[in-house]
Amino acid sequence: MKALSEMRDRLPEILEQKPWISEDEGKDLADKISDMRSWLGEKIKEQSEVSLHDDPVISTEAIANKLKPVTKLYKKLTEKKKPKEKKAKEQEEKKESEHESGDENIEL
């Protein structure tokens, strides 16, 4: 639960620092974190109702497997790099091609 809390708490900061991450991506991660927290809370409640000598309701392996996609999405968003600006690159190429075309006319 601590990892989920940290992810949830850092999400607004990440979205503010990286405006190229869409609201949908942020909302998707927030929803997955919320779902995971709800699921884990239910399992913890179920486990508290089971006596100590009974088999556990949930295993650490099941928790890790359920947490894996959330962690993967969180990592993907935190490591998402700013996209390169296409317009600036296209304008430079256009200027270069115009410049090269102008040089050819002068030589004739």
Image (cartoon, helix red, strand yellow):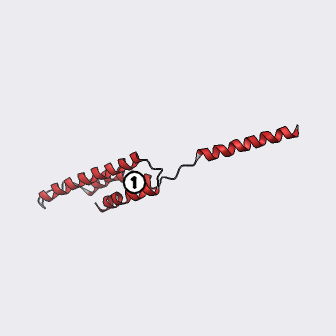
Residue at image location 86% in from the left, 40% down from the top: 106
Label 1 sits on a secondary structure element that is helix
Q: Quadrant of the N terminus?
A: bottom left
Q: As rendered, which of 81 and 57 lies closer to the eye? A: 81
Q: x, y percentage for residue 66? A: 30, 51
Residue at image location 39% in from the left, 45% down from the top: 24
Residue at image location 69% in from the left, 43% down from the top: 93
Q: x, y percentage for residue 68? A: 35, 52
67 w.r.t. 102: above or below: below
Q: x, y percentage for residue 97? A: 73, 41
Q: How many marks?
A: 1
User: Residue at label 1?
Assistant: 74
Q: Is residue 9 left or right of residue 94?
A: left
Q: Quadrant of residue 56?
A: bottom left
Q: As rendered, which of 5 and 49 lies closer to the eye? A: 5
Q: As rendered, which of 50 and 94 lies closer to the eye? A: 94
Residue at image location 33% in from the left, 57% down from the top: 8
Q: Is residue 2 left or right of residue 107?
A: left
Q: Amino acid at mark 1?
A: Tyr
Q: Is residue 67 left or right of residue 56?
A: right
Q: Quadrant of the C terminus?
A: top right
Q: Quadrant of residue 71?
A: bottom left
Q: x, y percentage for residue 80? A: 48, 52
The local crowd at label 1, few if under 14, some if 14 to 19, many if 20 or more residues have their Cα within 10 Å, is many
Q: Quadrant of residue 74?
A: bottom left
Q: Is residue 66 left or right of residue 22?
A: left
